[in-house]
Amino acid sequence: MTNLNNIIEILAKQAMGGQQQSNQQGGLGGILGSVLGQLGTNTSGQSSQGGLGDILGSVLGGLTGAQSQQTSNAQNSGFSGGGKSLLIAVLPLILGWIQQQGGLQAALDKLKGQGLSSQVDDWVSTGSGENASVNPEQVQNLFDDADVEQVAQQVNAPKQDVYSAISQVLPQIIDSLTPQAGQTNPQEANADIQQVLNLVSGFLKR
């Protein structure tokens, strides 16, 4: 197993303001069930019919319903207003992007090709300290503009805030997917990514 479930739990707790406690009994499923399942009940009838766009729509619809006060502040106070919601909202976007590249290794190669070799090496390494930062501008060319626009519209935040959230979460995701650095099994990482996306989709279809 990679550490993907750990970072999801952290992001989910942040998104819920620490009020929603994760259920450890079901492992990763329990984490997503307690957090995303909770969000899914607030989607006002929205349901996911499959595909990254529909999953994003359901997740973001839930976030908007569950945290209307936070998200309504996003435009007025910049990234700080809906920041915590955005951190979990961009999770399916990032995981879906990794899949679209052909898996973890292909995504790492893509990032390095965008001039982020030193950052990627730092994220993958098992050394101590914070992950190397990446600027929002450096991730803009990586993600589909339509997907980013969908996130921005549904959480009522500027697109730049979405890119800021991606730049914060992406290093954590890559770090969590490579617990053994270069020795990490990419197939295992890809399987964990698929599991998370399946669980997100499954919980929000209920």
Image (cartoon, grey):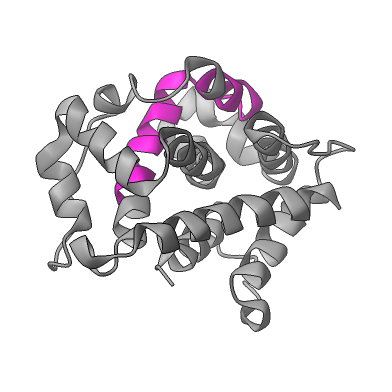
Q: In this view, does 170 lie to the left or right of 5?
A: left
With respect to residue 138, does 126 lie above or below? below
Residue at image x 34%, y 21%? 140
With respect to residue 144, does 205 lie above or below? below
* Magenta stretch: includes residue 42: no
Extreme residue toward the right, this view: 45
Residue at image x 41%, y 34%? 101
| Front one among 3 and 42 | 3
Extreme residue toward the bottom, this view: 25
| Front one among 4 and 149 | 4
* Magenta stretch: includes residue 152: yes
Residue 202 coordinates in the image, percent (x, y): 76, 53
Residue 53 coordinates in the image, percent (x, y): 65, 29
Quadrant of res 116: top left
| Front one among 128 and 1 | 1
Where does the N terminus fall, quadrant-wise? bottom left
Residue 3 coordinates in the image, percent (x, y): 40, 68
Main SS class of the magenta portion in the image: helix
Q: What stretch is highlighted in magenta?
A: 148-171
Asked whether the viewer can see residue 134, the reply is yes
Q: In this view, does 115 lie to the left or right of 195?
A: left
With respect to residue 57, does 76 lie above or below? above
Extreme residue toward the left, this view: 118
With respect to residue 187, does 69 lie above or below? above
